[in-house]
Amino acid sequence: MGMRQLTRCCAVVVFMLASSATWAQEPPVTVEDLEVRVKQLESALAELRGAGPREERLEELARQIEILAAELEDLRVGEAIVAEASTSLYGLGPGASKVYRTERGVSIGGYGEWLGSFYDGEDQSGDPSGTTDTLDDLRAVIYLGYKFSDRWLLNTEIEFEHASTSKSGEASVEFAYLDYLWRESLGIRAGLILVPMGFINEMHEPTTYLGANRPETERRIIPSTWRENGAGIFGSWGALSYRTYILNGLDASGFSASGLRGGRQKGSKAKAEDLAWVGRLDWDPTPGLTLGLSAWAGQSGQDLRTDAGRAVEVQTVIWEAHLDWRWRGLEVRGLWAEAELDDVAELNNALGLEGAFSVGERLEGVYVQVGWDLLAGRKGQKALIPFFRWEDLDTQARVPDGWWADPANRAEILTLGLSYKPLEQIVVKVDWQQVDNGASTGIDRFSLGLGYVF
């Protein structure tokens, strides 16, 4: 067994031993428990008063009732704060859902995160990695919403990335759409819309997912954060919920050997020669369990042509299946994603891509993540969650004849980390990633993250 494999095994064992401590924790104190106790003390107090003067006992019972009443009020307020900070509506994160909880008028929310990335000095093969450690004000986001009536609302997200536009930072509209909430089973949405695929794309606030870094499968195949202009419908029937839209298609001129991320149009003068359909279906058969799938289909050529004038259509199909299970302190998440592209040889020629720089005809990725809250069931909002995530990704699982795959684009990533929440709305993240790829150029890194949502 090599040193890297030994390190992996030891880390997983430590995680399992730490997680086992939660089995011995005390059951949580609930509002109902305290209400029962207050009623019992009030009954005892009434009996003593009826039996005649017993000043010391009466004073003691009155004091206990006052203490419990204060604890009960604190717990009710705390539960209300936690409920608002963790409630997701229509697939959006808690902050992005704020306008839906507003009675009327303006709503303001937001989130932000800082990221420190510290890389190994050597790559997987032992050569110098050539990477630079960074500290980044990754993003600061403002949600502005307006509820015109019980049925009409506007929801927007304005994002500032990397602190300064003078140093590769940018200011962007992440989404901006109008909703008409006709009934629970049918709403209408139009504008700049988050594509409803995977876990991270719609719910990307740092308090809603484990790890300082988002899974690569949800960056390169599902190119989060991904938004496009369009319109569609959404709703739910009992345990089933859905979202489906017609949007402008991807732009294949931005595709590369490393994935589809460069094909996003982000709502900015988006080419609409080719449109696309996206749909998502989720099933919640029992509290804490979600099973779902989503698909995207459309052409991505956007009037791209070969030197001979032939249109390059680039039919693009992306699909994913996902599972999320929460039970007491346990969190289990899994996702499989795959993309299939046509006309890739023509696309490569039109873009001048040769050799190992081919866009993939098939891209595939999968990850499994397990975490356990060591503080689950205890009083208060705190959470301490050790976790691991294993991911396997290949953005050139198949390439056209005449090109070949770069083994560096076939990667296996192991992430071991810890997330601490002093409050439901604040998170501190620490994790270590072991990155292996087929070219032996993977670089391990240690990351520190700090995030908030309001």
Image (cartoon, rainbow, N blue to C red):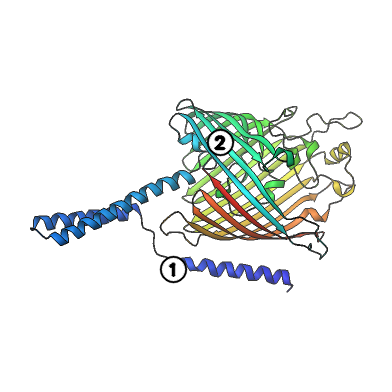
Q: Is residue 37 above or below residue 313?
A: below
Mark sitting earlier along the chain (1/2)? 1
Query: Residue drawn 80% across and 55% down?
Result: 408
Q: Nearer the viewer, residue 355 or 100?
A: 100
Residue 125, by quadrant, is: bottom right
Give the farthest residue toward the left: 52
What's the residue type where badge 1 is placed? Ala
Query: Residue drawn 43% across and 31% down?
Result: 103
What residue does disc 1 label? 24
| Residue 19 % position (x, y) | 52, 66
Name the secondary structure under disc 1. Answer: helix
| Residue 66 % position (x, y) | 26, 53
What's the residue type where badge 2 is placed? Tyr
| Residue 26 % position (x, y) | 40, 64
Q: Is residue 382 left or right of residue 248?
A: left
Q: Is residue 184 left or right of residue 177?
A: left
Q: Is residue 107 left or right of residue 446?
A: left
Q: Nearer the viewer, residue 342 or 447?
A: 447
Determine if residue 201 is in view: no
What residue does disc 2 label? 143
Give the farthest residue toward the right: 308
Q: Residues within 10 Å of mark 2 (few under 14, many from 20)?
A: many
The numbered disc on residue 162 is: none
Between the residue at mark 1 and the residue at mark 2, the CA separation in whole angstroms equals 41 Å
Q: Residues within 10 Å of mark 1 (few under 14, many from 20)?
A: few
Determine if residue 130 is in view: yes
Q: Is residue 130 above or below residue 21?
A: above
